[in-house]
Amino acid sequence: MTRKTETKFLNITQVVGANYTGYQAKVTVDGVEHQPYVGGLDERSLRKVLRERNALWRKFGTTARGILLTPLQLPVKSDSSSSGWLGICAKQRVERSGTTLDVFGVRLRNLFTGKQTSREVRCHQFKSDAAALGAAKRLAVRNITAYNAVVAEYNAMALRDAMVLAEEEVRLLTPLLDRLTQFDLERWELSLQCVYPESLCCSVDPEKGASQRVYERAA
C-alpha cells in the first residue's frame, strides 16, 4: 500500500510504498498532471525534487495554488441568471419611501482593493429595460477588463517573488512559499498603479462619468 503525505513545501509530497520511498512533485497545467518522482528521503533527494518542481514552474509560467489570482470571465449568456447573463441579476429594490424599483444587480470587483462588490443599474433611468441591461453589461465588461489587466500585473510580480523564494527553498531546504498564498493588498495597489498611473475616479469603472447612473450598495 502506498502512503502519500503532504510536506510543508508546496506541491511536494512524501511517498512511501512497499518497494519505494521518496518525494514527488505535482504541477497541474491545463488539466494535465506532471509528477516527477525522486527516490530517497534525504536532503539530496529533497533538493532534487524541489529543483524538478521549480523547473516545471518555469517551463509553464506558473506556481503553487493560491499565489496567483484567477482572471474573471466576461459576461456570457446564462439560462440560470434572471437577466439571461452571468453575473447580472434582474430584481426589485424597495426604497425607504416604499417605492419599488426594477434594477439590474451587477457583480463586480473593487479595483482599489480587488475584493468582490456590486452595483445596481436602475431601469427607470433608461428608455427601456433592454437599454438598462445593455448599460449593466457594458459596466461589467469595463470592470472585468480593468480587473483582469491588474490581475495580469499582480501575477507577474507574484510569480517573480515566488520563483525567488522557490530557489531559496532549494538552497536552504526550508519552506518559504506559504507566505505568498494570501492575497497581498500592497502588491495589488502597486499593480493598479502600473496599469493606471493616473488615479481612478471610480472604484469599479475606469471610465470617467460612467458612474452617473450606477448606484452602489453594500457588498
Image (cartoon, rainbow, N blue to C red):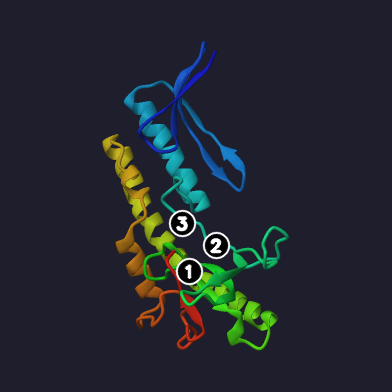
Residue position for label 1: 147
Give yes or no for contact between labels 3 and 2 (Cβ–Cβ under 8 Å). no
Mark 2 crowdedness (10 Å alpha carbons): few <14, some 14-19, many ≥20:
some
Give yes or no for contact between labels 3 and 1 (Cβ–Cβ under 8 Å). no
Q: Is residue 202 above or below residue 185?
A: below
Q: Is residue 186 left or right of residue 159?
A: left
Query: Residue drawn at (50%, 72%), measured in percent from left and top?
Result: 119
> The N terminus lies in which quarter of the figure?
top right
Mark 3 crowdedness (10 Å alpha carbons): few <14, some 14-19, many ≥20:
some
Spatial separation of the CA atoms under disc 1 and disc 2:
8 Å
Instruction: Tell me which amino acid carries mark 1.
Output: Tyr
Give the image location of residue 124, x and y in percent: 60, 84
Query: Residue drawn at (52%, 33%), measured in percent from left and top?
Result: 36
**Residue positioned most to the top:** 18
Give the image location of residue 15, x and y in percent: 47, 22
Residue position for label 3: 69
Residue position for label 2: 72
Q: Is residue 160 visible?
A: yes
Give yes or no for contact between labels 1 and 2 (Cβ–Cβ under 8 Å). yes
Give the image location of residue 192, x and y in percent: 38, 71
Chain-order first, disc 3 or disc 1: 3
Q: Nearer the viewer, residue 194 or 79?
A: 79
Instruction: Tell me which amino acid carries mark 2.
Output: Leu
> The C terminus lies in which quarter of the figure?
bottom left
What secondary structure is marked by label 1? helix
Instruction: Tell me which amino acid carries mark 3.
Output: Leu
Spatial separation of the CA atoms under disc 3 and disc 1:
11 Å
